[in-house]
Amino acid sequence: MTNRRDCLCAGIIVADQVCEPIAKLPASGQLVLTPRLSFTIGGCAANVAVDMARLGLSVGISGCVGDDLFGRALVDMLNARHVMTDGLAVLSDIPTSGTFVINVQGEDRRFIHCLGANAHYDPEQISDDELRQYQVVYVGGYCLLDCMTPARVEQLFKRARNLGVRTVLDVVVGDRQDNWNWVAPVLPMTDVFLPNNDEAAVITGESEPWQQAARLRAAGCGTVVITCGADGAIYDGPAGRLSIGKHNVPVVDPTGTGDAFVAGFVYGWLRGFEAADCLRSGAALGASCVQAIGATTGILTSAELADAMQRDRLDVRQQGD
């Protein structure tokens, strides 16, 4: 099929309420002021979809929202950002998923989360007719939701493969004790898996990123890309074993950084970049994300991304060099 759309993003969609960094957490009964509280799009699938659309890709989203104020606002915001929302299910009497993102100066973020409508998402709501319209299907937030089971995601990826659609997997690791048993069955059907090193450690039981990647590839995954925070990212795939550092930029809000990296990497993949430039694209888009409040606010356009990659070109090293 020619003239396919670029990517269908499936999974978690969240209404984020984010505070600008405060000096300290309030004590019981205390009020602490923040310069700004922002209502933004959140959740892996929604963040990646918005970031890709900002880059000029044709993007759809599949997921669930509630029939409430937050759900209607998210649909309006996604449409305004040129994400196709006809794949969303609107559920009655179930709240839209939401997160309070609490930023404290000098500390990592804190989250208060309601699963809401996301807990009812079933990848089987993606029909073959919808799937075959896209070049790539991305599943975000895997391992967090009981309803998004290994059998269902494996079947979605099998259907995608049969239709010539490439597959991308992303995870959110919560309290589940059997993460390997969830991830392993899906890996042989996964073209690219993009966890961070903390998630990969929980999944594989390995503490070192290259060992994590080796175990994931041995289980059948085509390409593994692991983001490693301040240490950049690593790639283990057909192009070999590559590593990249990070851009040194002021961090305002790290919310959505990993999703931005994913969007940048997949953008490069769709545009036919070599693996090293896919990593550079992911790193540059991640760096743009952290410089603004909200998970998608600071994302670059494709022209801005190309300029950023050229202006500050990160070294990509072959493992062993």
Image (cartoon, rainbow, N blue to C red):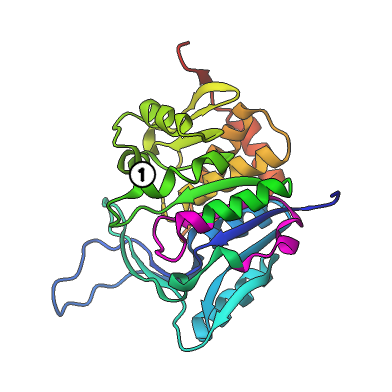
Q: Nearer the viewer, residue 219 or 13?
A: 219
Horizontal and vertical percent position of residue 52 = 64, 53
Instruction: Please give the name of the residue rendered at 30% of the width and 32% of the height, measured from the top-left corner.
Output: 206
* Mark 1 crowdedness (10 Å alpha carbons): few <14, some 14-19, many ≥20: some
Q: Is residue 213 above or below residue 77?
A: above
Check if residue 131 falls in the magenta segment.
yes
Horizontal and vertical percent position of residue 228 = 39, 36
Q: Nearer the viewer, residue 32 or 127?
A: 127
Pointer 1: what residue? Answer: 180
Instruction: Please give the name of the residue rendered at 14% of the width and 71% of the height, measured from the top-left corner.
Output: 27
Amino acid on which the number 1 mark rests in the picture: Trp
- Magenta stretch in the rendered image: 125-152
Horizontal and vertical percent position of residue 118 = 46, 70
User: Quadrant location of residue 32?
Assistant: bottom left
Q: Nearer the viewer, residue 121 or 14?
A: 121
Give the tally of numbered discs.
1
Instruction: Please give the name of the residue rendered at 73% of the width and 45% of the height, measured from the top-left corner.
Output: 164
Mark yes or no: residue 300 visible.
no
Q: Is residue 144 above or below residue 170?
A: below
Given the current orientation, which residue lies at the most extreme bottom position? 93
User: Quadrant location of residue 94?
Assistant: bottom left
Instruction: Please give the name of the residue rendered at 41% of the width and 42% of the height, measured from the top-left corner.
Output: 196
Given the current orientation, which residue lies at the most extreme left position? 28
Check if residue 70 falls in the magenta segment.
no
Q: What element does badge 1 sit on? A: helix
Given the current orientation, which residue lies at the most extreme top position? 321
